[in-house]
Image (cartoon, rainbow, N blue to C red):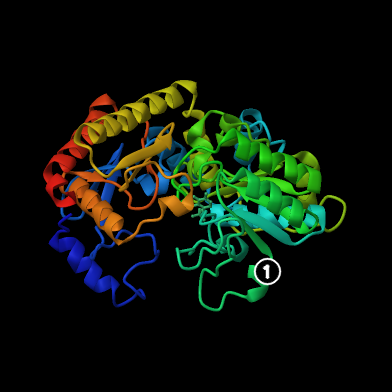
Amino acid sequence: SKVGQRSKDRFARAQLVFPDGTSRVSIDRGPVPRYIERGTGSYVIDVDGNRFLDLNANFTTLIHGHAFGPVVEALSRQLHLGTCFANPTESEIALAELLCNRIPCVERVRFVNTGTEAVLFAIKAARAFTGRSKIAKLEGAYHGAYDWAEVSLAATPDTWGSPRAPRSTPFYRGMPASVLDEVIVMRFNDADAARRLLSLHGHHLAAVIIDPMPSRAGLIPPTPEFIAAVQETARMGGVLVIADEVLNLRQSFEGASARYGLVPDLITMGKIIGGGLPIGAIGGRQDVMEVFDGSAGPPLLPQGGTFSANPLSITAGLAAMRHLDHAALAHLEELGNVVRNGIAGAISKSVAPFCVSGAASLFRVHPMDQVPNDNREAYLGPHASKRMKQLVNFFADNGIILPYGAAASISTPMNRTDAIFVVEVFARFLHTHRASWK
Ligand code: PMP
């Protein structure tokens, strides 16, 4: 975890121009962030010349790792052709076709620039379609920076409220009370509560937004009962189901909803579909997506964006998604299993206060005895968060970047040796630190 002098020098400069020396709260700063010089495949090299296996991959974006050949080629070609136009380009049709062909609920698509924007427009689309304004969401689930989606994100044990009806806690000082009033919060995998809350508030709800496997709520799969409860009560109340797959689209060829039996009306995408460039997309049922239709006068929901569907993001995304075929996904799934099973095996051998969750190419190590069942159980108290920091630092000392409090991801350039390396470092960590947990 020792950050080199060059990173320190850069951070000293950065502190004079950024409020806390960075441009995003999610930077692992601890206490000086590591400045990256370049990335190649699944590895990054920092400005001090240290090399790391990158399990963060820009928060699961880089499914083919850094500087992936086909993406570099597509971008180089496009750079010479121009980077953005006020007119459409053919490439956006190709990426939209790919998504419509692959993802069952996607009949029509709109491209935007980030996952935040995708969520924002999906919620607005649901409002425009239903004429209602409220939404329901899962406690502690992250969906980007749209105010309504941020409610309850900062939930801590003192603000949770009753387990049957979690409180709508504000995310930042000054968050409008009217926003809090318009968001119903439910706990992940609590099927009874989902039925009760969605029936109770049904006629006021435009949408319920569900990440099929929210990483902050523990990165655990949804139970079939929970999926059915959400699906059935939403349908009865005329509430649209939005699946936020900005992170979890990578779970299968058809996405995460398909993997877990959820049939959403709208889906939000981002991260992997931009090949490492900024992107977001809203997809869904044709009749719902018609709210964006401006062909016969102003649409119910006008959606623009100076950089929406810019050909750099689109061509990079197209190259990445074309290479994310069944074989690539099987490779990712296999390495994911090697890592998860290996880590679970090391834990059971040493009886350490750790556990591992995840699926496909995603995993998350929890500094607790048992895999949490929801966001409340996944919450880290002071002891657990100290153990987690020990783990992240140990990994960094041994050449692996492991995200803290977020999903770690496998990328296609990784091989079995890389996966086994992760397991070995984890086993060594348990061996080194086990005395401190007694
Ligand atoms: N939704 C989910 C599930 C996400 O994981 C994220 C980003 N981590 C977002 C939305 C927001 O995406 P972006 O950072 O591109 O705005």
Quadrant of res 398: top left
Residue 351 horizontal/vertical position (percent): 23, 38
Residue 434's place in the image compared with 321, above or below, is below
Q: Nearer the viewer, residue 309 or 290?
A: 290
The residue at 46%/47% (across/down) is: 215
Split into 4 quadrants, where in the image is the N terminus? bottom left
Name the amino acid type tagged 1. Asp
Asked whether residue 419 is in view, the answer is: yes
Residue occupied by mark 1: 181
The residue at 65%/62% (across/down) is: 183
Residue 245's place in the image compared with 98, above or below, is below
Q: Secondary structure at mark 1?
A: helix
Residue 330's place in the image compared with 395, above or below, is above
Side of 101 relative to 399 (left or right): right
Residue 437 horizontal/vertical position (percent): 19, 50
Q: Residues within 10 Å of mark 1 (few under 14, many from 20)?
A: few
Side of 401 relative to 431 (left or right): right
Q: Nearer the viewer, residue 233 or 148?
A: 233
The residue at 25%/33% (across/down) is: 348
Residue 80 horizontal/vertical position (percent): 47, 45
The residue at 75%/59% (across/down) is: 302
Q: Nearer the viewer, residue 340 or 431?
A: 431
Side of 49 relative to 66 (left or right): left
Asked whether residue 264 is in view, the answer is: no
Residue 113 horizontal/vertical position (percent): 56, 53
Quadrant of res 233: top right
Q: Residue furthest right?
A: 296
Q: Nearer the viewer, residue 283 or 372?
A: 372
